[in-house]
Image (cartoon, grey):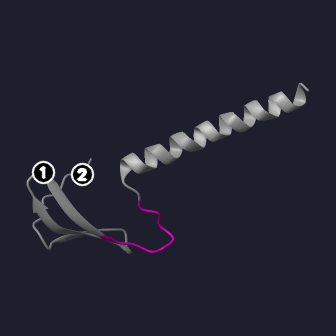
Amino acid sequence: MLVLTRKNGESITIGDDIEITVISSKNDQVKIGIKAPKSIEVFRKEILEQIQSENEQASKDISSMMDFIKNK
């Protein structure tokens, strides 16, 4: 993992088209701004994990439903 130190208003770039800027930091929170193409999805990690979990559960539910239908 690359660890960088940035002050308020300073940025880092990822590739040619993603820029992450430190907007402010206060107590235990850092506010960041992200400039990226609309084709790049940006999620908070906990939200992405929730989406993935719900997708896995939905897939299991569909499999169970298909098994139920086949056995009728």
Q: Is residue 19 left or right of residue 50?
A: left
Q: What amino acid type should be assigned to the residue bearing mark 1? A: Asp
Q: Residue furthest front?
A: 72
Query: Within the magenta stretch, is there residue 36?
Result: yes
Q: Which quadrant holds residue 17? A: bottom left
Magenta residues span 34-42
Q: Nearer the viewer, mark 2 or mark 1?
A: 1
Q: Is residue 37 above or below residue 42?
A: below
Which percent across, then down, holds residue 7? 9, 66
Q: Is residue 35 above or below residue 6?
A: below
Residue displayed at 77% across by 34% down = 65
Q: What amino acid type should be assigned to the residue bearing mark 2? A: Leu
Residue displayed at 12% across by 51% down = 28
Q: Which residue is mark 1?
A: 28
Q: Is residue 59 left or right of residue 43?
A: right
Q: Secondary structure at mark 1?
A: loop
- Which label is found at residue 2? 2
Q: Nearer the viewer, residue 50 or 13?
A: 50
Q: Is residue 71 above or below residue 8?
A: above
Residue displayed at 46% across by 44% down = 50
Query: Within the magenta stretch, is there residue 16?
Result: no
Residue displayed at 11% across by 69% down = 8
Q: Specify the quadrant that holds the C terminus.
A: top right
Q: Residues within 10 Å of mark 1 (few under 14, many from 20)?
A: few
Q: Is residue 54 left or right of residue 21?
A: right
Which percent across, then down, holds residue 13? 29, 69
